[in-house]
Image: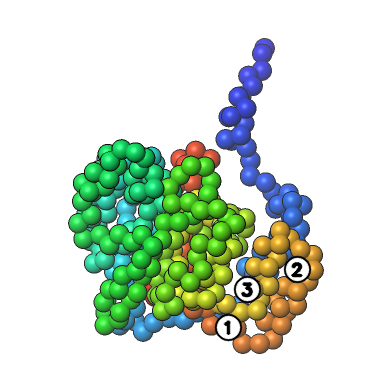
Amino acid sequence: MFKQHGSGLDALIHRPRPSTWQVFLQNPCIFIVKKLYSWRRLAKKRQDASSEVSVVCISDTHNSQCTIPTGDILIHAGDLTQSGSLGELQATISWLRNQPHQFKVVIAGNHDLLLDSSKDGDSDEAAISRQQIEWGGILYLQDNFTTITLKGRRIKIYGSPKSPRHGNWAFQYSRENDVWKHTIPDDIDILITHGPPRAHLDLTTLGCDYLLRELWRVHPALHVFGHVHEGYGHEWLQFDSFQAAYERVIISGGSFWGLISALKAFVLSLFTPPALATCQLANPSLVGGLRDDARRKPIQVYI
């Protein structure tokens, strides 16, 4: 006789995803330029099979564990934990140490508070706890690089835990500050950051403009990041005029004249040989959904 009404939180959690038409109406220029970008032609750069390196990418596990495919390199792009305690960190590190990959490379994320010494406060308790972490053979990077030798190749890897400020978490910076300028070595092969670059696997608004600028300067073979859980996925970059035009539309928030410019660049690209795609992006955030109750698979790439 009486109709049951769900709570406002239940309605929010179980709300249907917007339809294609609704997404279009929210921002027609962004919708169209993203569709054009998905139609671009790709000529992918691949290594010889004998020297090809398999990289397994994960991020934002937040204390969860999953089955990880075998490969040459395992990368975790931060947010190993939910609250950054020593117990959480050591549990995830022990899980990673038990994986069979020859090289395991890890950076921190904004949830990994213990690893950020600026969050220590007046007590020396956090510093003592950090000294107790047993990294084993894991290569932990914090705004520095390492070079590994694999299949006759020297592979240079740079890692940084930084992400734009949202709340009072670890390793964060103001979006107005260019913290990336000339911090990444020119000859890097693999770039690992916790936060994404703008316009790519970041829901179009949550990535960093300055990190995107560095990506254009450095041109790594692979960029692994996380932080934006719903940006999960894989993408190739060509660093051509159409990509630049696409990014300008995204960064402008949907400029009409920017869209016209992107449309011209897209049409021109149909009549010229495609630029070689030399850079792969991976956002392998393993948790997702409004309450982080979804679980995704690691992303495996070859460089």
Residue 64 in the image: state x and y as whole percent: 35, 44
Query: Which residue sits at x=35%, y=48%?
Result: 117
Left or right of 153? Residue 162 is right
Q: Quadrant of the C terminus?
A: bottom left
Q: Quadrant of the N terminus?
A: top right
User: Amino acid under label 2?
Assistant: Leu
Query: Mark on residue 259?
Result: 2
User: Label 3 neighbourhood size at 10 Å, few (<14), some (14-19), many (20+)?
Assistant: some
Quickly name the residue at label 1: 275
Quickly name the residue at label 3: 243
CB within 8 Å, label 2 to label 1:
no
Tell me how far mark 3 sits from mark 2, CA to CA: 12 Å
Residue 294 vertical placement versus 141 (above, below):
above
User: Label 1 neighbourhood size at 10 Å, few (<14), some (14-19), many (20+)?
Assistant: some
In what element is the residue under mark 2?
Answer: helix
Q: Which residue reaches farthest front?
A: 122
User: Amino acid under label 1?
Assistant: Ala
Query: Which residue sits at x=68%, y=68%?
Result: 248
Residue 64 in sight here: no
Task: Give whichever of discs 3 and 2 has the lower sequence position.
Answer: 3
In depth, the one of 214 and 81 nearer the eye is 214
In what element is the residue under mark 3?
Answer: helix
Q: Which residue reaches farthest top?
A: 1
User: Amino acid under label 3?
Assistant: Gln
In depth, the one of 78 and 130 nearer the eye is 130
CB within 8 Å, label 3 to label 2:
no
In depth, the one of 47 and 160 nearer the eye is 160
Task: Give whichever of discs 2 and 1 has the lower sequence position.
Answer: 2
Residue 99 in sight here: yes
Left or right of 157? Residue 196 is right
Which marked residue is nearer to the observer: mark 1 or mark 3?
A: 3
